[in-house]
Image (spheres, rainbow, N blue to C red):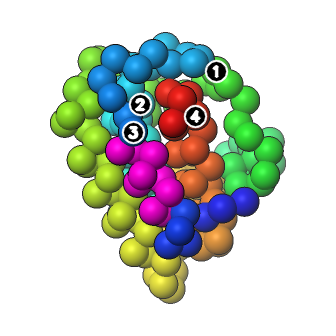
Amino acid sequence: MKSLFESDTCSEILSRLDKLEDGIPPQWGRMTVGQMAWHCQIPLKVGIENKPPKKKPNPLIIWLFKKGLYNDRPYRKNLPTSPFAKASEPRDLKEELPKLREMVEAFHRLEGRPEWNPHPIFGVMTREQWGKMQYKHLDHHLKQFGV
């Protein structure tokens, strides 16, 4: 599995982001391309901010889903979205894309961060797991819009 901490992989994601255009229809799901660009910022922000979780993550959620975040199997299409990351209003790609690019680059620069706080939903994760999870999520949504 690729990692967003790898320079070539980060460049690949940025190049694919450059191919996004307003009006591209999703190949699955209901998000617009602008909503997807907004949605993809949420997990990056969680990693960048590196805040300690406010409550202990649910062990059942960790057991059921954590390994799927960073293994080689693609995410299933039409997975439910966490309510805090659901784009419920229209989003402008021209406004959201530069923010997403900036967050991808900022996350990539954290490769040498010595300590990672636990993920608020999935608990303790290594730097390697964080990098793979971020790549896999971005790759999933870029494929959703054919890039």
Q: Mark 4, mark 2: which one is toward the viewer?
A: 4
Q: Say whether disc 3 or disc 1 marks the residue closer to the N-terminus.
A: 3
Amino acid type of the residue that numbered disc 4 sits on in the rendered structure: Lys
The residue positioned 38% from the left and 26% from the top of the image is: 33
Mark 4 closeness class: few <14, some 14–19, many ≥20 residues within 10 Å = few
Secondary structure beneath dot 3 equals loop
Mark 2 closeness class: few <14, some 14–19, many ≥20 residues within 10 Å = many
The residue positioned 20% from the left and 34% from the top of the image is: 94
Q: Say whether disc 1 or disc 2 marks the residue closer to the N-terminus.
A: 2
The residue positioned 34% from the left and 66% from the top of the image is: 106
Secondary structure beneath dot 1 equals loop
Does 143 sit above or below residue 51?
above
Secondary structure beneath dot 4 equals helix
Name the residue tied to disc 3: 19
Report if the CB atoms under discs 1 and 4 are less than 8 Å apart: no
Give the image location of residue 83, x and y in percent.
47, 27
Residue sitting nearer the eye, 54 or 117: 117
The magenta-colored residue range is 10-18
Amino acid type of the residue that numbered disc 1 sits on in the rendered structure: Asn
Secondary structure beneath dot 2 equals helix
Determine the image quadrant of residue 79.
top right
Q: Mark 3, mark 2: which one is toward the viewer?
A: 3
Residue sitting nearer the eye, 141 or 9: 9
